């Protein structure tokens, strides 16, 4: 038997004004065939989970395509068409296959399509016979749609935030595939869309609270004929028509049971809606003062409103400005994306004194460039591999980078958009986060997977940017109304969903 496997992932923030292009996919990875297995086989990825289970079942994995762009603005129509055509051509070349496993993010939007993940699923479905199994894994920040559910046999979501169960999720999806091929499983799915969105940082994580309660309920529902139960909490920066939380339950041939489980989880999610709302953000100067007064470092300051995992550019400067002005008692590490400033510092050379204008070249809405006078302590290309429990083993190219030190503040100037969630990023340029007083990351949640072990304290910043958790300040126009929390008194009956 042969099962085709593919990954095609990007998480869109529709409030970011510049597009995501083919170059953004190729900057992280775009692999085909055996390259895909070499690139992802030993990583914490859904593809690795697919490979684990297929190998264990003695089923041949047919690698088609794996590509992943860092979060950003809507994907250009041409880019999406190129990648989908590539996927479909490789599927056709591999035909016939006995099944298809897809790893999607689930929150991609293109310039002219709100639901490209649903388009991928339905295009793959159209390319294979109706009785060929099609099982999909998705990030829990996915925005589930009716089309995706209708055109697939099963959709299985992550359970952890920060995400550490990518490989487990791939395995869960692949086990349903193997069950269909070997044991005659006949999955049926039920789906409930819930009219709510919530901010990403304060409660959508693994610590005790509403998120943990929901994920435990989903896991507990997977008994007997319930093959999978998922709650998709959706990321909030999507101004699209079919927007909101969703639940999906998959059973072995029992639509009533699937509906009952999906409705029960939807009722639980709805009941938790207020618990998700309370923000715990600190003003920047207050956070720096707390870090200075802390008994020891490192204190992790999360500049989440410029979160690169949430599509923001990573070139916000508000935190750098306040650090440069502060009276610090130990090293502070902060990063900013600015390829031009990096090139200038590299040209000046190691040890050179430079005076640069850095940042706020993409985010010209909420931030302004900052003057940085200091000494170059690193210059050149850099890359790192994720450690910790997150995207373990996956490589990230930081581009041509420089570090400029001004007093206690070391500013890492990044050439590329980078997931800043792992201490390995700073280590790649000679900075050891464990020895710092302050370390700044640009992430809502995912940094907890990389920094929990060394962080003495974590402070979420109330900083200006394009992935703010102040949802009421974002210019939503297309989401369906009424929608919680914008319509606080909305009533919703999951049983009718
Ligand atoms: Zn996610």
Image (cartoon, helix red, strand yellow):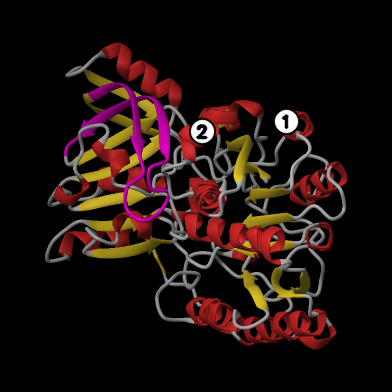
Report if residue 238 is visible in the image.
no
Mark 1 falls on what kind of element?
helix
Which part of the image, by quadrant, shows the C terminus? bottom right
Residue 322 picture location, percent across and down: 32, 48
Residue 450 picture location, percent across and down: 33, 54
Front-lying residue, 110 or 326: 110
Q: How many angstroms separate mark 1 from mark 2 (CA)?
A: 20 Å
Question: Quick check: 334 left or right of 298?
Answer: right
**Residue that label 1 marks:** 90
Q: Any magenta on residue 395? A: yes
- Determine which quarter of the picture holds residue 418: top left
The residue drawn where x is 24% and y is 14% is 349
Report if residue 172 is visible in the image.
yes
For mark 1, does the 10 Å Cα neighbourhood hold few (<14), some (14 to 19), or many (20 or more) residues? some
Question: Quick check: 458 left or right of 484?
Answer: left
Residue 380 picture location, percent across and down: 31, 20
Question: Looking at the image, which residue sits at the far top?
Answer: 347
Q: Is residue 128 above or below residue 397?
A: below
For mark 2, does the 10 Å Cα neighbourhood hold few (<14), some (14 to 19), or many (20 or more) residues? many
Question: Quick check: 421 left or right of 5?
Answer: left
Q: Which badge, 1 or 2, is on the more N-terminal residue?
A: 2
Q: Which residues are magenta?
A: 378-407
The residue drawn where x is 20% and y is 17% is 352
Mark 2 falls on what kind of element?
helix
The residue drawn where x is 20% and y is 56% is 298
- Mark 2 and mark 1 in contact (Cβ < 8 Å)? no
Count of numbered tags? 2
Q: Any magenta on residue 449? A: no
Closest to the camera, between mark 1 and mark 2, is 1
Q: Is residue 182 above or below residue 188?
A: above
**Residue that label 2 marks:** 28
């Amino acid at each position: 038997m042969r099962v085709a496997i593919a990954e095609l992932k990007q998480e869109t923030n529709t409030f970011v004004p510049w597009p995501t292009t083919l170059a953004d996919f190729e900057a992280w990875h775009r692999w085909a065939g055996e390259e895909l297995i070499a690139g992802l086989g030993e990583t914490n990825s859904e593809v690795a989970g697919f490979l684990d289970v297929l190998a264990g079942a003695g089923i041949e994995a047919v690698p088609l395509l794996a590509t992943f762009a860092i979060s950003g603005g809507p994907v250009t129509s041409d880019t999406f068409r190129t990648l989908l055509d590539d996927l479909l051509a490789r599927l056709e070349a591999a035909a016939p296959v006995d099944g298809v496993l897809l790893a999607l993010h689930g929150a991609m939007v293109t310039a002219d399509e709100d639901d490209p993940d649903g388009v991928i699923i339905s295009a793959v479905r159209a390319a294979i016979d109706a009785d060929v199994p099609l099982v999909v894994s998705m990030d829990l920040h996915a925005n589930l749609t009716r089309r995706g559910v209708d055109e697939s046999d099963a959709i299985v979501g992550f359970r952890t935030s920060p995400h550490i169960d990518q490989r487990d999720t791939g395995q869960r999806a692949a086990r349903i595939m193997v069950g269909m091929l070997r044991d005659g499983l006949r999955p049926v799915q039920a789906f409930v869309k819930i009219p709510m969105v919530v901010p990403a940082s304060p409660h959508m994580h693994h610590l005790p609270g509403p998120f943990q309660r929901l994920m435990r309920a989903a896991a507990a529902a997977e008994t007997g004929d319930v093959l999978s139960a998922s709650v998709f909490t959706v990321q909030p920066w999507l101004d699209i028509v079919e927007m909101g939380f969703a639940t999906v339950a998959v059973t072995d041939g029992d639509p009533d049971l699937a509906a009952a489980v999906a409705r029960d989880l939807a009722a639980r999610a709805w009941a938790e809606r207020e618990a998700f709302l309370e923000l715990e953000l600190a003003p920047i100067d207050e956070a720096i003062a707390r870090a200075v007064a802390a008994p020891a470092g490192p204190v992790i300051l999360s500049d989440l409103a410029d979160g690169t995992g949430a599509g923001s550019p990573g070139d916000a400067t508000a935190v750098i400005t306040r650090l440069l002005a502060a009276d610090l008692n130990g090293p502070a590490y902060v990063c900013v994306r600015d390829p031009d400033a990096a090139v200038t510092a590299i040209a000046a050379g190691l040890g050179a004194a430079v005076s640069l204008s850095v940042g706020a070249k993409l985010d010209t809405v909420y931030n302004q460039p900052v003057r940085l006078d200091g000494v170059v302590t690193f210059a050149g290309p850099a890359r790192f591999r994720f450690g910790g429990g997150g995207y373990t083993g996956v490589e990230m190219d930081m581009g041509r980078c420089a570090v400029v030190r001004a007093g206690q503040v070391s500013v890492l100037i990044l050439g590329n958009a980078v997931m800043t969630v792992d201490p390995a990023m700073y280590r790649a340029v000679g900075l050891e986060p464990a020895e710092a007083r302050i370390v700044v990351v640009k992430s809502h949640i995912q940094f907890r997977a990389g920094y929990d072990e060394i962080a003495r304290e974590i402070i979420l910043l109330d900083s200006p940017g394009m992935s703010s958790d102040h949802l009421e300040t974002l210019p939503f126009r297309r989401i369906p109304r009424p929608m919680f929390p914008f319509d606080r008194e909305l009533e919703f009956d999951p049983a009718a969903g």
